[in-house]
Amino acid sequence: MIKASTNIRTFTAANSSDRLHHLVIRIATGDQAAFRCLYAFQVMRVWRDAIRVLPHPVDARAVTRSTFVEVWHLAGHHVDDAWVDNRAWIAAITVRRANDRLRAADWQCPIDGDYDRHTHLELAALLGAGHATIRTGPAIFTRVDDLDLNLAA
């Protein structure tokens, strides 16, 4: 009986990996709906990874945004690599972005606010306008329409 559940978990993980790979393929062609789907599935994992190493939630949100913008821009480089674990790829981007943030804090040269603002605007444009609600943090849900309003606040 335990063996059957292990097989089911393995099958589910394989299906999840395949779905993620198909989303990355679609994102590489410019499919914003696939990007929104990937974002919805992965945003909490990315945020949790960032908040574990960064001292401030503001930095974790900025790293989360920049991670997804980078995923959008680099998706085309991973289309032919079916063997690549896309979760690990996204996690590696998150770690690199978080380390950049930590290095900037160590050198006391904060990341330029214009960069964070540009990244926020680009992510909002990629997610598209609409009444859809997305998770932007733990227990925080935001309408896509309100992303620009949150930036101004």
Image: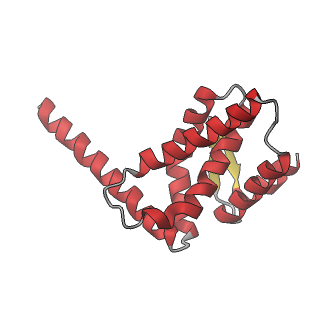
Q: Where is residue 49 in the image (x, y as percent from the top left)?
A: 55, 34
Residue 47, image quadrant: top right
Examine the rendering and report whether any part of residue 146 can be seen: no
As drawn, 56 above or below 151: above
Colour convention of the picture: secondary structure
Examine the rendering and report whether any part of residue 116 can be seen: yes
Q: Where is residue 36 in the image (x, y as percent from the top left)?
A: 57, 60
Q: Which of 100 and 48 is in front in this view?
A: 100
Residue 86 left/right relative to 1: right
Residue 151 left/right relative to 4: right
Residue 20 left/right relative to 62: left
Q: Residue at x 69, y 61 (%)?
A: 131
Q: Position of residue 83 (x, y in %)?
A: 31, 56
Q: Nearer the viewer, residue 115 or 3?
A: 115
Residue 64, image quadrant: top right
Q: In which quarter of the image is the N terminus?
A: top left
Q: Residue at x 43, y 47 (%)?
A: 87
Residue 139, image quadrant: top right
Q: Which residue is drawn at 66% across and 42% down?
A: 63
Q: Nearer the viewer, residue 63 or 126?
A: 63
Q: Where is residue 23 in the image (x, y as percent from the top left)?
A: 44, 63
Extreme front residue here?
107
Extreme bottom residue here?
29
As drawn, 39 above or below 126: above
